[in-house]
Image (cartoon, rainbow, N blue to C red):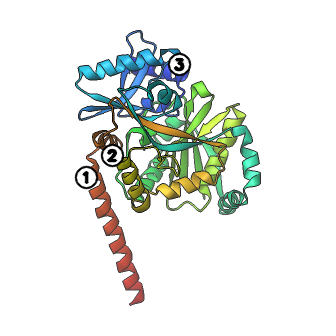
Amino acid sequence: METSVLKARELVMTYGRNATAYQILNPGISHWFQSHGNAVVGYVSRGAWLLVAGEPVCSPSALPETTTEFEAFARGRHCRVCYVCAAEPMRQLLGNSPDHSVVTIGAQPVWNPADWPRVVRSRRSLRAQLNRAINKGVHIDLLAPAEGALHPEVRRTLLEWLRSRRLPPMHFLVEPEVLSGIVDDRFLLLARRENRIVAFLVASPVAARNGFLIEELARSPRAPNGTSELLIDAAMNRFAEAGSTYATMGLVALAAGTTADNPLWLRGLMSIARAHANRFYNFRGLERFRAKMHPASWEPLYAISNQKRFSPQALYAMGGAFSGISPVRAIGLAVVKGAREELRTLLSRVCKSS
């Protein structure tokens, strides 16, 4: 492991409060270290923008100085900065700054794992999903993440999951290749049916909040209904056994009721996306899935740019960071893939009726 990555991991495991903190150790993330060496920023570069994964990882008292120093580094590269999936501490720091703009991009559901058994007891629909998977012979195993990174069935499940999605594989804070990054502090749960892996879950620590982020949940089309819920149930129970007091499943983009204070042009785009883009990314389905787990609360997440008004250029750079390619090209690829799938479905129906 490189010295810089070791240093970043040490800081993440000491100061990582944002749910995205451990994700800065994923493939494709660059690291900037504060001159004093007690802070790290994980970021990707897209054109004239540096997109920060969450926020600087440092002690709360060092956050203002670290932010100022990183933005000076960006200016030296003739770049602007956007903090993506920033949480409340960054909003409080920069929300009243005349040189920064804040928009809400969604929210993340939060649980105390110790309360999870009560959630299961109180939600009949959740218990029904768990029983469906169990009755279909699904059981959960724990595997060392380093072994999972090399396991052919884990790899096959990941590829099946990615092929089932309309959008091309995404990156940045939704990187599918998490097991190719640093895995020392993560854990991996497998869902097996008839001795074959049909789904898996990867969780990463949120060290400074005594908790975990459910970072990835990959499910093969072969997995029975309820498999995802069974993995989450096993993860929550494991969090509770470890004494964790915080768990989240990460950002739900465009979560209902979170974007009302955004600029008018951005609210319009978000409304269109929520209403019409579900064929490519199931915003509403993802939110419903999280909500049926009855989280204790929802934490707003923000994008904060160092410009007086949040701009379409910042939004475009964010899209490029997640897609890894031009957002326009990503949408085009999704449209082509969706058209092919719909054509195959139509031809199949024609063949069955003839």
Tag in front: 2 or 3: 3
- Point out the image quarter for the C terminus: bottom left
**Is residue 31 placed above or below 113 in the rendered structure?**
above
120 vs 44, left or right, is right
Q: Are dots 2 and 3 in contact, CB under 8 Å?
A: no
At label 1, counting other C-alpha atoms closer than 10 Å, the crowd grade (few under 14, some 14-19, many 20 or more) is few
Residue 6 in the image: state x and y as whole percent: 44, 19
Quadrant that contains the N terminus: top left
Identified by mark 3, the residue type is Pro
The residue shown at (41%, 41%) is: 175
Residue at the top extreme, as displayed: 36
Where is mark 2, residue-wise? 323
The residue located at (28%, 63%) in the rendering is 336
Residue that numbered label 1 is attached to = 329
Residue corresponding to mark 3: 60
Q: Nearer the viewer, residue 111 or 354?
A: 111
**Tag 1 and tag 2, C-beta contact below 8 Å:** yes
Which of the two discs, 2 and 3, labels the residue nearer the N terminus? 3
In 3D space, how far apart are the residues under numbered discs 3 and 1 (Cα atoms)? Answer: 39 Å
In the image, residue 47 sits, relative to residue 165, either above or below, namely above
Of callouts 1 and 2, which one flags the residue occurring earlier in the amino acid sequence?
2
Identify the element where label 3 is drawn.
helix
Label 2 sits on a secondary structure element that is helix
Around disc 2, counting alpha carbons within 10 Å, would you say few (fewer than 14), some (14 to 19), or many (20 or more)? Answer: many
Q: Do the residues labelled 3 and 1 touch (CB within 8 Å)?
A: no
